[in-house]
Image (cartoon, grey):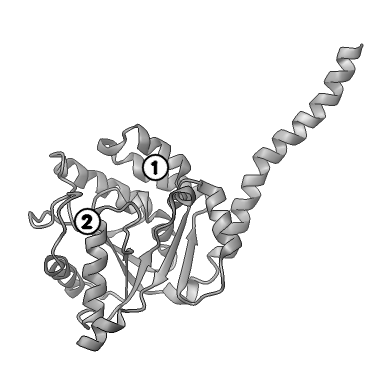
Amino acid sequence: METSKLNWLISPALFWTLSFLILTPFFIWTYLTETMNSNTLNTFSKKSILIIIAHPDDECMFFSPTIQSLSKISKVHLLCLSIGNDQGLGSKRQLELESSCKILGINNFKCLDDSKLPDSMTIQWSNKDIVKHIKTYMKSHQIDQLITFDDYGVSGHTNHISIYHAVSDAIDQGIFKQKLYTLQSVPIMIKYSFLFGAFWTKLNAKEDSTRIWFISTVTEYINGRLAMYQHESQMVWFRHLYLFTSRYMILNELHVYQGNSSKMTSN
């Protein structure tokens, strides 16, 4: 009798505890998607946008929320500046990128194979070579806005950082007239805090016309994971973990590049 009374008391407590643990993340996610994407419509609506990445898999590891959000209201282009051939898998990775783009809804993409732009953590790419390829792509497409990495490149990868410096310098020098948005790097504790990192960002966000947020719906998050799974050659154990822990799988924060006044003055 005592045991049955104890079970009767524990069961409701366990039920409500489990319900809280399961439903709270869902309500947080719903709240974020309804409040953090609201300022993007006028900024990007009906625009032609070029997202510039360094390697196949960057598009889904880092830019998935941006790509899927913009695909609903804009024409999204993707330019990948290397085939990711550091392990001799470049041809395979090109095909993986194509499959990933289909899942993410990107119909306009190009992946370059230029020996001057090798996939390397130690070789810094030339601004001249990067700008040349971007200009060539933009000659064939009417591009209104540019999106790429910031000056840390999210992961600190040398190739990511090279793209930022090349594109920002081209804007400072008046070579590119488009507005540039950069994907913001965050501290590692926030980077690997998934949904709670996104919620923390929301709590600390300030109204600012120079910052844009994109957060994926649950369906878009699943699509982002499916896109990453297309990169079979890259799916080592820690990338499986990344899909469950990285804030970049569900939230992107973009900043408007304001320009380097010293560079613009010198020009």
**Tag 1's secondary structure?**
helix
Residue name at image x 16 percent, y 68 percent: 127
Question: 92 above or below 77?
Answer: above
Does 75 sit left or right of 2 as displayed? Answer: left
Q: Is residue 120 above or below residue 141?
A: above
Q: Residue at x 27, y 83 (%)?
A: 262
Quadrant of image for the C terminus: bottom left
Asked if residue 172 is positioned above or below residue 94 in the image, the reply reads: below
Residue that mark 2 sits on:
159
Mark 1 → mark 2, Cα distance in angstroms: 25 Å
- The residue beneath circle 1 is 226
In x, y percent, where is residue 167? Answer: 24, 70
Amino acid at the residue labelled 2? Asn
Estimate how packed mark 2 is, as few (under 14), some (14 to 19) or many (20 or more) residues with alpha carbons within 10 Å.
many
**Residue pictured at 41% horizontal, 60% vertical:** 66
Kind of residue at disc 1: Leu
Is 35 or 156 nearer to us in this picture? Answer: 156
- On the picture, is 21 further left or further right than 163? right
Residue 141: horizontal and vertical position, in percent? 23, 72
Say whether residue 163 is left or right of residue 204: left
